């Protein structure tokens, strides 16, 4: 199989990867011998245990097949981007209730419901606590601000947006702590005790909706009820079927989409550079001294995960048909959506930075 990208161009080629198969078009040669294409697709089908119902991708650089059919049920989290197939997301009879991979409605209601309530909204892609405050996001223009370097390098203006979505240590950002974040996903890394005065000062001075989506440590989970009491009506839980390795920034994009936004711009949703090593500084927009420490740190892994995310958004959900996307970090050397956004939703404002 070919290991270079000469001759591999066009809308089927993303981040050094291209489609070998899609349900509507069948096998796609794209410069490869059809026999090699067929072997690669058969390998993929053997790995997932059935014939693919989604596009099958091939990483030319690392000679790997991958796609949306990899889930927690048939592969590890480094390989998969989804908790389960659509058919097992809401109700799963495949995994035992106490399995670390069991995230169906019964488990979610058991884990979160006793703290926040059990009236939820759910479909094959997302489940979340029904809260009237979320209705305001319908038809809005939302900016997602994650922790990648472009969030501090790009001169974005909060006044250009109806609402701001962010995550975790957003309240440490010199820029963000001066503005109103309307929706924030808070994970295991946030200290919710009274000792974290910066976090609570921000929460008390703003009306931010807090969203919990992880299985927090036992100690952290003790704060669920306290947080719900302290910030009454502003705490929800949610999680998406999509659960890719690059982290919460991509899920924030999905939350904005699934909550009804008409425009979703994003900044700080970047990825990593080709030469990134464990221990290197992130250039993080919120935590200046944060280092790369992922056990699965791998540029190729991230490259494939960004391909799968946008394959899911553009080709599966077809959200670009009704939502306008803008990648404000387009062109940055760590922005792994660049080659995709330039083709499907090119940046309309040239910041002249990269």
Image (cartoon, helix red, strand yellow):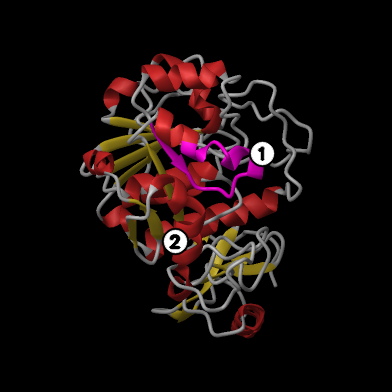
Q: Which residue is mark 2?
A: 312
Counting the numbered discs, the total is: 2
**Residue 225 placement (x, y as % from top left):** 48, 39
Occupied quadrant, residue 190? top right
Can residue 105 be seen by looking at this rendering? Answer: yes
Split into 4 quadrants, where in the image is the N terminus?
bottom right
Between tags 1 and 2, which lies in front? 2
**Alpha-carbon distance for marks 1 and 2?**
23 Å
- Foreground pick, 231 / 32: 231
**Residue 229 placement (x, y as % from top left):** 41, 33
Q: At 45% across and 58% down in the image, what residue appears?
A: 109
Is label 2 in a helix, a strand or a loop? helix
First-in-chain label (1 vs 2): 1
Q: Residues within 10 Å of mark 2 (few under 14, many from 20)?
A: some
Q: At 73% across and 50% down in the image, what residue appears?
A: 296
Residue 189 belongs to magenta span? no
The numbered mark at residue 273 is: 1
- In the rendered view, tell whether residue 297 sits above or below residue 290: below
Instruction: Identify the magenta region.
Output: 209-225
Can residue 10 be seen by looking at this rendering? Answer: no
Residue 222 belongs to magenta span? yes
Occupied quadrant, residue 149? top right
């Amino acid at each position: 199989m070919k290991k270079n990208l000469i001759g591999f161009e066009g809308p089927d080629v993303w981040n050094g990867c291209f489609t070998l198969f899609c349900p509507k078009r069948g096998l796609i040669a794209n410069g490869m011998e059809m026999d090699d294409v067929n072997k690669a697709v058969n390998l993929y089908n053997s790995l997932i245990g059935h014939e693919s119902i989604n596009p099958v991708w091939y990483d030319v650089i690392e000679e790997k097949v991958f796609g949306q059919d990899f889930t927690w049920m048939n592969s590890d989290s480094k390989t998969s981007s989804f908790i389960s197939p659509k058919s097992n997301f809401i109700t799963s009879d495949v995994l035992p209730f106490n399995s670390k991979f069991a995230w169906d409605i019964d488990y979610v209601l058991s884990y979160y419901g006793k703290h926040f309530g059990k009236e939820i909204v759910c479909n094959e892609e997302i489940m979340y606590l029904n809260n009237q405050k979320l209705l305001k996001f319908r038809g809005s223009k939302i900016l997602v601000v994650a922790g990648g370097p472009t969030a501090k390098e790009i001169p974005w203006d909060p006044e250009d947006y109806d609402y701001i979505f962010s995550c975790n240590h957003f309240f440490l950002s010199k820029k963000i702590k001066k503005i109103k974040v309307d929706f924030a996903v808070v994970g295991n890394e946030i200290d919710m005790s009274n000792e974290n005065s910066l976090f609570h000062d921000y929460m008390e001075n703003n009306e931010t909706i807090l969203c919990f989506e992880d299985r927090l440590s036992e100690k952290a989970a003790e704060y669920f009820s306290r947080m719900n009491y302290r910030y009454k009506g502003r705490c929800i839980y949610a999680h998406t079927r999509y659960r890719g390795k690059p982290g919460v920034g991509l899920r924030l994009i999905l939350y904005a989409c699934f909550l009804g936004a008409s425009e979703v711009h994003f900044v700080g949703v970047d990825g990593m550079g080709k030469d990134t090593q464990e221990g290197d500084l992130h250039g993080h927009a919120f935590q200046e001294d944060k280092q790369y420490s992922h056990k699965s740190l791998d540029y190729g892994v991230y490259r494939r995960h960004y391909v799968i995310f946008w394959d899911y958004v553009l080709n599966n959900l077809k959200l670009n048909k009704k939502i306008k996307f803008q990648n404000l970090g387009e062109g940055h050397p760590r922005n792994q959506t660049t080659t995709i956004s330039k083709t499907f939703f090119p940046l309309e404002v040239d910041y002249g930075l990269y």
